[in-house]
Amino acid sequence: MRRVVVTGGSCLSALGFETDEIFDSLKTFKNKVVRMDAWDVYTQMNTRLACPVTQELPEYPRKKIRGCGRVAVMALASSHKAVEMAGLAEDTSILKSGRMGVAYGSSMGSIDALIDFFSMLKTYDCSGITATSYIKSMPQTCAVNISVFFGLTGRLITTNTACTSGSLAIGQAYEAIKYGKQDVMIAGGAEELNPTESAVFDTLFATSTKNEHPELSPASYDKDRDGLVIGEGAGTLILEEYEHAKARGAHIYAELVGFGNNTDGDHITQPKKETMQMALELAMEDAGISPEQIGYVNGHGTATHHGDIAESWATYNAFKGRSVPLSSLKSYIGHTLGACGGIESWLSINMMNRKWFSPNLNLKNVDPECAPLDYITGYGREMDVEYIMSNNFAFGGINTSLIFRKV
């Protein structure tokens, strides 16, 4: 089997776009959640909290992005920065080789384009439909637009699996390289903020309603947590076969050594700790390591009642009762849905390399129903570890686990 390494990466979120800027923001120990006053018009929706990207997105020639809605532009911006970091932006011998592809996902395409189709059905007027309406709204919009932007001729994989879109894309890209089908892959996920996404969770009583105190939510694993907060952004890794990266003198940020993926096969929205545990164990088996070797877990940490409990016990049991250090980045940037796997993987890799791991914000009293893990709090923790794990779980009972090794 071939080794797979990370030679570039980038993420865009409410924390920022530059990695140093993001870590400066993490060390203020304040989240980026705000009250969305514009959402007051939705009288049947309880939450008013969200975590938007407020900075201006990079500008690209219209010809390059005419098929992009906001979600695809964020995906493209993150991927462009990652490709540049990997030293591949101008290397047409690799970009056009057929040995470089893309695996990318989001929960859905751009909502604004979908609204145009809805309007047609309600008003019987097709004037709002344009030549790019479907391109912007289609599930594969991120992967396709990235592929076209860079002129890639390799594999295209789209993973539209809600909260595991980014992590599943990374895992499938890893396997494409590991088994010799590709040499380089752009992999990750993106999501744009829209009140409809908050409404989905609001109907399940899974959103936070601390509307006048956005700084207090989300509170992953805390006994007083009251639900999730939706965010937006994009996260991308450049995965590359080790010898290929070494031959061209690429900088290696980490090695991706393990991937676990399965489904609950039980309930669409209720997580199942037994199969979640199996996904983590599959990743460790794939990596060929024991639980004792993993020094940190980046948890999914949605701050929902059932989700936190199931995830924590799945982790505790997969680690054979070991109280492994764990924190969730969602306490800073909310739940970025299809983007979270990419964002959290890249920031976890950087925490490993910087030997500092961010705390769980708003975690004052661990829920006694959650497993007794080593939940990082306060000012974070300095640790020098060789292996880290990043876990994500999604509607449909889709479970993913990724393991990275320090190089």
Image (spheres, rainbow, N blue to C red):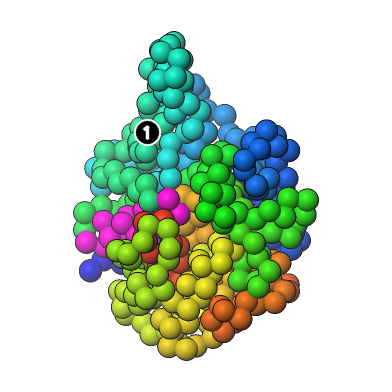
The quarter of the rendered structure image containing the C terminus is bottom left
Give percent across and percent down for residue 333: 63, 54
Is 405 drawn above or below residue 15 in the view shown? below
Is 174 colored magenta in this rendering? yes
**Main SS of the magenta segment?**
helix
Closer to the camera, 307 or 19? Answer: 307
Closer to the camera, 58 or 115? Answer: 115
The type of residue carrying mark 1 is Met
Residue positioned most to the right? 212
Residue 365 visible in rendering = yes
Point 34% across, 75% down: residue: 278
Give percent across and percent down for residue 103: 34, 48
Closer to the camera, 212 or 5? Answer: 212
Point 57% across, 79% down: residue: 369
Label 1 Cα neighbours within 10 Å, binned few <14 / some 14-19 / many ≥20: some
Quarter of the image where one finds residue 196: top right
Judged from the image, the secondary structure of the residue bearing numbered disc 1 is loop
Q: Which residues are magenta?
A: 162-179
227 lies left or right of 188? right
Q: How many numbered discs?
A: 1
Is 286 drawn above or below residue 170 in the view shown? below
The quarter of the rendered structure image containing the N terminus is bottom left
Give percent across and percent down for residue 394: 42, 58
Read off the residue under disc 1. 138
Is 86 colored magenta in this rendering? no
398 lies left or right of 73? left
